[in-house]
Amino acid sequence: MSHTAEQPSTKTGVLDGLEPREVLGYFEILAGIPRGSGNESQVADWVVDFARSHGLEAVKDQRSCVLVRKPGQGGLENAAPLILHGHLDMVCEKAEGVEFDFVNDPIRLVVEGDYITADGTSLGADNGIGVSYILALLASDDFPHPPLEAVLTAMEELGKGGAAEFDTTQLRGRRMIDFNWITDKEILAGCSGDVTFTVDIPAEFESAPTTHSAARLLMVRGLKGGHCEFDIQLERANALQVLARAVLAVSNRFDVRIAAPYGGAQNNAIPADAEVVLVARPEDLDGIAEVVSRLGADLAVEYDVADPDIRLDLGAADVPDRVFSTAAAHRLTTLTLLIQHGVVRWNLHVTDRVETSNNLGTIRPTERGVQLMSTITSALTSRKHELYDRVRALVELAGGGVTTALFGLDAPEFPYRPDSELLAVASQAYRDVLGEEPAVEVSQCSLELGMFSRRVPVADIISIGTELHALHSPDEKVNHRSVERVWPLVKEVVSRLG
């Protein structure tokens, strides 16, 4: 399906009647274009068409990152350029039992009071709302602003793969406003960095023993999941590790083989579901069900607060043509359990902030076996690399041809600068427009700010946000009243940057 550049005024739909139309209209258009990480080509083409329809210079690179330039206006034509940043992609999660094709289907928007959400899937407000502010700024002609360089990156949610290859030498600006933040109560002025890695485990495929003529699908279901940075301290269950624990419990009592392990939505989302085919002797099925039931009862007690709906299910399955060798299955389960997930260190300089964490996010089949993907987030680059060195040590001990590699951008942290001019301007605009004092946040999350500060280099960066909830999950929602509150602030901030 192709998408031609539309304007909010010509697009009718679920968000009609909500303000600001010039922002939410673009958000609804974006919701109609599939844009999961790695599938941004269509939305990037739409942005290029949009820019050119406004007489603006635009270029799309091979990773589907887009750069749009707009001259200054309203007397600020000769001011220093300002970089605007957001990311085009979204995390694709759906609720249990929901049929949805993220490669082809548009997001189905729903308005519930003050909130916009999606029908059974993640919403894409992260970072569709931020991109919509940028599109509205590019389309504007009624207020002053300096020359703008809008950088819309791809694969931000997948190892920041687009930013890793983006040609930053194109940029002339040395100050940047990012729109990838999650609240309108704060101005973000510092953040952590991250790095994503993969672990490839050969399956040593073989035929199932003739005695193993029965199969069951072992499923981990009912978990909340969530964002690997904002929710990592909540001690929610990791579906991949729960699955590995269940396989190990069964294997300790019965001779089983495994096939087709699969789980998690994305490397930076806490995995909410996982499954694997268990191949066994028919006479062992009742015993396997008993082990799974007993472990399920234990998990319900362990996670009665953090993940009260956790469950292990067994379903029907066909016996596959090939299974993992016993040794390969053991390597998979033990590595999945031993790679540290969750908070690794708390920040001793900033109260109640995580310094370093790891999210073991996905397990996917490969031609040779299976691949784990995980994202480490840290306020300190050295801690991040220390944790990855531990993973490398585990991989070396595992043997059997297991390998690990870094994936995407090794994104550095962006340290807080109390003397930031952008922060001062934005804080005063916040007071004048909203009549309140903004909080200044230095976050445990990892954005692409550090990359821009190192590679351009951008000397001054802040992030302005909107009230978002339950990111990277089917419960994701955005407060449209917050969008209405933030849009005048955005215009005022850019107008003051002469």
Image (tube, grey):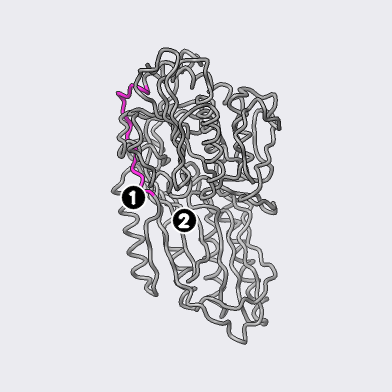
Q: Residues within 10 Å of mark 2 (few under 14, many from 20)?
A: many
**Residue 30 location, x and y as percent?**
59, 37
Left or right: 42, with 356 as reference point: right
The circle drawn on residue 360 is: 2
Alpha carbon of mark 2 to alpha carbon of mark 1: how far?
14 Å
Q: Earlier in the sequence, mark 2 or mark 1?
A: 2
Q: Residue at x 60, y 78 (%)?
A: 321
Instruction: Locate residue 313: give its quadrant.
Output: bottom right
Magenta residue check for 415: yes
The circle drawn on residue 77 is: none
Left or right: 398, with 436 as reference point: left
Write down the region rendered in magenta: 409-423
Task: Identify whether 39 is placed above or below 477.
Answer: below
Instruction: Locate residue 168: give its quadrant.
Output: top left
Q: Nearer the viewer, residue 153 or 225?
A: 153
Q: Residue at x 37, y 43 (%)?
A: 193
**Residue 74 location, x and y as percent?**
45, 13
Q: Main secondary structure of the magenta part?
A: loop
For mark 1, what is the residue?
Answer: 384
